[in-house]
Image (spheres, helix red, strand yellow):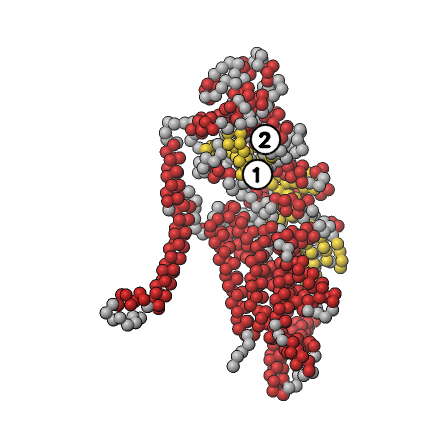
């Protein structure tokens, strides 16, 4: 480390850029750690001084409040930890579906903005500029207002037999539980696996011989056909659990609640406007010469987009798209405003009832951090996969 | 850390105060500054809400005005501090307000661990249910399977879940944080019922329902919420003044003394009326107040019945029945100890 001046080691050490670099870093880390320790210690001391209980023991106690909708079994007799898991699952469900829907709408609108059709391009512009410039919270209120202004359950709209649309949500018939169901799922997965294999084989053969194979259609046939054959083989058990009006509301069948519908619509429509712009910028980033070259090689329009433009555009699209996915996931916490029982909503009630505000907020923050980091890792892996390989 | 130390020092001081013989510090401070600083609700129609000119009115506001009338002979010597549910207890504990009259439920924890003293309950409330009339529901027991709109409060959600479990009924909650969003969802028909403190239901029905007559509040109450003006622990003289100012309003109704007939009542032969109105002196001196203290309350604020009718009862938009808040002679819980 010491450069020159062997007679004055101290002086030379300080003048060493490398040593100073390390020293500054150590000082900064020490300051950050000290600040963190001070904040934690100060909070704990003050909470203790006010006689406010701290710790995570409350998670095991009985929650005592009910939750409107839950993907898993839950009753008020379950623990706070169980209630928070229900909230987490609700958040994950709406975030996952929201990301899928927002991507779908965003890609379509993004391509539409580049369309040669004047009306289509202008409508897409109107959508993007209208939606992304209005705060999401207001949009959620509008969606919730629309959904709750539907007629009541006793005057429910009945567009198709067994399907009811009212201000209590969308009720649909569900197949009654049957022992064949897990096997059908297994057949679906098996079919999908076979389709994947066919795709790999088709691509390898195409690379080798140049002969194309319709792997998409074959794959679709395999994925859907296998469960269908099994279903017919056991005699097509089609007993349905149809929703019926009983007392205040419909009983039986499946439900899409107004809160969930409004939140999902709000999140995906809002985020899709940003995704549309990202897709548009990605496509425009590919030089026009690429399209012209592909077309002059005889590739169809669709194949040009799929095989030439998109693989190059994705490199530009993926990083900002990751941010939008993270935004959508975090925005799902606006659910408290329209009554969807997401993690934040459940945590709020938990904090109100137990008084463990610091711990409750800490749990919510940690969970969102983990979700976001996981999503980020996944997208970074995908980004590395589609990145241009330079040789 | 220095903040923590000063807080700790303040805590020690407060604790030490309870052992010293010194009493009446709040009273002295109030007299010195010339007004009562009263903590009230941010705006709950019938209890404490400002009108378009900024004048506060309501049942809780009348409690503040009664104390000011007793101390200063002028019910208008009050300054109001609007407080949220989270702010209210710290504001009183820290001395920001002298009196908290903000529909606050009297509970054991607040009365002890939180360092407060509750005075006289000025409204006996309970959590209830509001339903659309066309649903034809007559009792909360018929709400099996109902969807219920509820605010995320300290105990509201839990009371609801407890009650339905105890009665082996089921329900679906819709929990929305903002009051206006929740009530508009209910009036749009998202829920079969709206559950909150019954007085709040009445206020929402009167002010926010498109057609108030289309909604009914069910008679069942599923919790006890004695709403009580509250002061700091260990200030006995101040607690006594607030307590007896509130009792004066009840005693006034018991004896038929109103803001209109109080001057004629000065000539009443009833010895209790003479003691209340200070014709027979003694009560004022005992409290450290002017002998006209109770006369001033009844003259300027009125008795409890007048206050109730004007703010939440027949004379108001809320039209709440007296129920538990009637005088004990009429089957209610309002009862004043003797003015002797």
Q: How many discs appear?
A: 2
Q: Pick whichever of labels 2 and 1 is earlier in the sequence.
A: 1
Rendering quarter of residue B205: top right
Residue displayed at 70% across by 38% down: B212
Please identify, in this view, whether the residue under mark 2 or under mark 1 is nearer the observer.
1
Asked whether the residues under the numbered discs 2 and 1 touch, taking CB atoms below 8 Å apart as contact, a structural biologist would say: no
Mark 2 crowd level (few <14, some 14–19, many ≥20, 10 Å Cα): many
On the image, the x and y values in percent for residue A10 come to 27, 65
Which residue is labeled 2 in the image?
B59
Please state which of residues A63 and A102 is positioned toward the viewer in this rendering: A102
Q: Which residue is mark 1?
A: B42
Q: Residue at x 68, y 51 (%)?
A: A145
Q: Is residue A234 visible?
A: no
Front-lying residue, A269 or B172: A269
In the displayed structure, B282 sits above or below B51; it is above
* Farthest residue, direction left: A7
Q: Is residue A311 among what the camera can see?
A: yes
Instruction: Please tell me whether residue B212 is drawn above or below residue A146 in the rendered image.
Output: above
Quadrant assignment, res A186: bottom right
- Residue at horizontal 58 percent and vertical 57 percent from the top: A331
Q: Examine the rendered structure and indicate whether residue B155 appears above or below residue A261.
A: above
Q: Name the subunit of mark 1.
A: B
Q: Is residue B87 left or right of residue A180?
A: left
- What SS does tag 2 mark? helix
In x, y percent, where is residue B227? Answer: 55, 34
What is the CA distance from the residue labelled 2 to the residue labelled 1?
Answer: 14 Å
Q: Are marks 2 and 1 on the same chain?
A: yes
- Above or below, A17 against A202 in this view is above
Residue A140 place in picture, x, y as percent: 64, 53
């Amino acid at each position: 480390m010491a450069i020159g001046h062997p007679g004055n080691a101290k002086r030379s050490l300080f003048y060493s850029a490398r040593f100073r670099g390390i020293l500054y870093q150590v000082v900064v880390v020490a300051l950050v750690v000290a600040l963190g320790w001070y904040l934690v210690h100060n909070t704990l001391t003050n909470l203790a001084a006010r006689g406010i209980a701290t710790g995570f023991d409350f998670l095991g106690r009985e929650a005592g409040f009910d939750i409107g909708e839950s993907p898993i079994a839950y009753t008020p007799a379950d623990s706070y930890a169980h209630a928070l898991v229900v909230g987490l699952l609700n958040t994950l469900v709406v975030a996952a579906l929201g990301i899928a829907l927002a991507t779908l709408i965003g890609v379509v609108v993004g391509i539409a903005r580049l369309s040669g059709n004047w009306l289509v391009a202008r409508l897409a512009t109107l959508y993007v500029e209208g939606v992304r410039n209005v705060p999401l919270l207001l949009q959620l209120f509008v969606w919730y207002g629309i959904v709750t202004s539907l007629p009541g359950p006793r005057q429910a709209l009945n567009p198709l037999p067994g399907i009811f649309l009212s201000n209590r949500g969308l009720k649909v018939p569900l197949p009654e539980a049957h022992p064949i169901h897990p096997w059908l799922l297994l057949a679906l997965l098996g079919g999908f696996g076979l389709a994947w294999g066919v795709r790999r084989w088709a691509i390898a053969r195409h690379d080798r011989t140049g002969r194309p194979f319709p792997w998409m259609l074959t794959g679709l046939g395999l994925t859907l056909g296998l469960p269908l054959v099994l279903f017919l083989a056991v005699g097509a058990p089609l007993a349905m659990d149809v929703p019926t009006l009983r007392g205040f509301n419909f009983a039986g069948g499946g439900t899409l609640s107004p809160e969930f519908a409004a939140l999902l619509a709000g999140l995906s429509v809002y985020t899709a406007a940003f995704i549309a712009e990202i897709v548009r910028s990605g496509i425009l980033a590919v030089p026009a010469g690429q399209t012209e070259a592909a077309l002059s090689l005889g590739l169809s329009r669709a194949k040009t987009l799929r095989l030439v433009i998109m693989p190059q555009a994705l490199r530009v699209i993926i990083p900002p798209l990751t941010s939008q996915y993270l935004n959508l996931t975090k925005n799902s916490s606006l659910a408290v405003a329209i009554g969807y029982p997401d993690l934040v909503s459940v945590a709020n009630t938990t904090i109100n009832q137990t008084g463990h505000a610091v711990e409750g907020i800490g749990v919510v923050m940690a969970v969102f951090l983990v979700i976001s980091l996981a999503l980020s890792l996944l997208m970074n892996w995908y980004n590395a996969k589609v990145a241009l390989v330079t040789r | 850390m220095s903040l923590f130390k000063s807080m700790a020092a303040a805590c020690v001081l407060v604790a030490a105060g309870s052992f010293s013989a010194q009493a009446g510090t709040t009273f002295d401070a109030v007299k010195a500054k010339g007004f009562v600083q009263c903590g009230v609700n941010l705006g709950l129609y019938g209890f404490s809400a400002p009108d378009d000119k900024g004048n506060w009115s309501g049942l809780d506001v009348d409690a503040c005005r009664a104390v000011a009338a007793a101390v200063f002979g002028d019910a208008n010597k009050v300054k109001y501090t609007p407080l949220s549910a989270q702010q209210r207890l710290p504001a009183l504990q820290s001395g920001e307000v002298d009196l908290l009259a903000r529909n606050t439920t009297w509970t054991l924890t607040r009365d002890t661990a939180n360092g407060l003293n509750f005075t006289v309950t000025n409204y006996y409330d309970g959590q209830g249910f509001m339903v659309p009339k066309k649903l034809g529901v007559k009792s909360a027991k018929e709400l099996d399977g109902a969807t219920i709109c509820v605010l995320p409060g300290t105990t509201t959600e839990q009371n609801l879940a407890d009650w339905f479990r105890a009665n082996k009924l089921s329900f679906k909650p819709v929990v929305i944080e903002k009051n206006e969003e929740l009530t508009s969802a209910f009036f749009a028909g998202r829920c079969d019922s709206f559950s909150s403190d019954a007085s709040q239901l009445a206020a929402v029905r009167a002010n926010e329902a498109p057609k108030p007559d289309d909604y009914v509040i069910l008679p069942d109450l599923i919790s006890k919420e004695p709403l009580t003006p509250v002061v700091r622990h260990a200030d006995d003289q101040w607690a006594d003044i607030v307590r007896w100012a509130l009792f004066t309003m009840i005693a006034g109704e018991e004896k038929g003394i109103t803001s209109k007939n109080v001057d004629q009542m000065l000539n009443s032969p009833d010895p209790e009326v003479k003691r209340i109105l200070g014709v027979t002196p003694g009560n004022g001196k005992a409290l450290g107040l002017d002998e006209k203290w109770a006369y001033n309350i009844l003259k300027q604020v009125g008795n409890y019945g007048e206050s109730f009718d004007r703010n939440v009862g027949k004379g108001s938009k809320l039209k709440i029945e007296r129920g538990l808040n009637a005088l004990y002679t009429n089957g209610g819980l309002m009862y004043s100890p003797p003015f002797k």
